[in-house]
Image: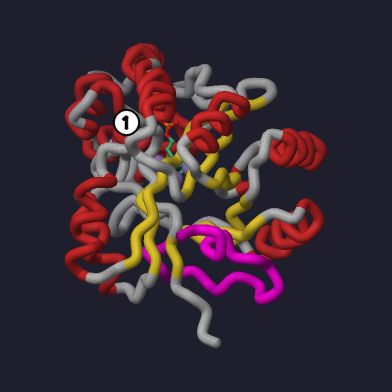
Amino acid sequence: MKPLNADLHCHSTVSDGLLAPSDLVRRARENGVELLALTDHDELGGLTEARATADEIGLRFVDGVEVSISWGDDQTVHIVALGIDPRNTDLIEGLRQVRSGRDSRAGHMAAELDKVGIHGAYEGALRHAGNPALVSRSHFARYIVEQGHVKDVKSVFDYWLAKGKPGYVEHAWATLEDALRWIHGAGGIAVIAHPGRYRLSKAELRALFIAFKDLGGRGIEILSGSAKDDEVREYSRIAREFGFLASRGSDFHGPGESWIDLGKMPDLPEDLTPVWSQLS
Ligand code: AMP
Ligand code: MN
Ligand code: MN
Ligand code: MN
């Protein structure tokens, strides 16, 4: 049987993506996606529009969100929540709290960037984000490219915004416990996003998987836009060992700015149980 083209991780203008929710849904359909989840960072605001468009064009849609958490020694980890009820008040309030730290973090980032010759970054990033509660490093990166400092967003991260670089500031996101409580309370399935992208040792990553599973976490992203072949093999092995459901998501942010376009990832290894088998 032909595997389902599911894309369960992407971003719209409601967080740090470049396309409005409705345009994202249409693009997914044009790319052959058969099941789509919108997973904006810490924000549910695009789901109504995305679902309405998906209904209109006959695309199966899952309500999602990508929750930022802090883990261990100032490591940021992302948990994708799938099949959540976007009206759940604990989830709404929890995410509001997570977002509330972004504005002051952006002020600190801009102050650090100013010291290394990048001026006006707070205002510039805010212009791209449109809302102080949504300002992310992606918006800073777009402003810095626009100012002609480097040619692309990826280079901005390499020079200024990745952990350890001059514009990086530590930040306390949600705890793993809180995030999983909100997700489960809203009827969703929690999935560890892009496990290959964290700067964690093998032992630290393993501790994360154990804690995640203990708290009822059920899924892991095997095919994310950035996953290399050896990572796909490694996290497939982890999925088998821990009994995790396997997810597949592009992490698409916009044309020309992402690892891969919507729905263009390879298929999951056949023996894994896809997370969408558990989504209605
Ligand atoms: P923030 O939530 O503000 O820390 O921003 C994180 C976002 O920055 C991620 O969701 C990605 O969209 C983007 N990002 C992180 N690292 C990179 C990178 N190396 N290249 C391009 N975008 C990145
Ligand atoms: Mn992002
Ligand atoms: Mn992420
Ligand atoms: Mn993402």
Question: Which residue is drawn at the image coordinates 41% and 46% (left, top)?
Answer: 64
x and y, in percent, of residue 171 in the image: 50, 18
Q: Residues within 10 Å of mark 1 (few under 14, many from 20)?
A: many
**Relative horizontal placement of residue 175, taking residue 91 as reference (left or right):** right
Q: Is residue 179 visible?
A: yes
The residue at label 1 has a CB less than 8 Å from ligand 1: yes
Q: Residue furthest bottom?
A: 1
Amino acid on which disc 1 is placed? Phe
Residue at x-position 44% and y-position 73%: 5
Q: Is residue 220 magenta?
A: no
What segment carries the magenta color? 260-280
In the rendered view, does 89 fall on the left or right side of 269?
left
Instruction: Check disc 1 and report its element: helix, strand or loop.
Output: helix
x and y, in percent, of residue 59 in the image:
29, 68
State left or right for residue 71 relative to residue 242: left
**Quadrant location of the C terminus in the rendered image:** bottom left
Q: Nearer the viewer, residue 44 or 232?
A: 44
Question: Circle 1 is placed at which residue position?
Answer: 140
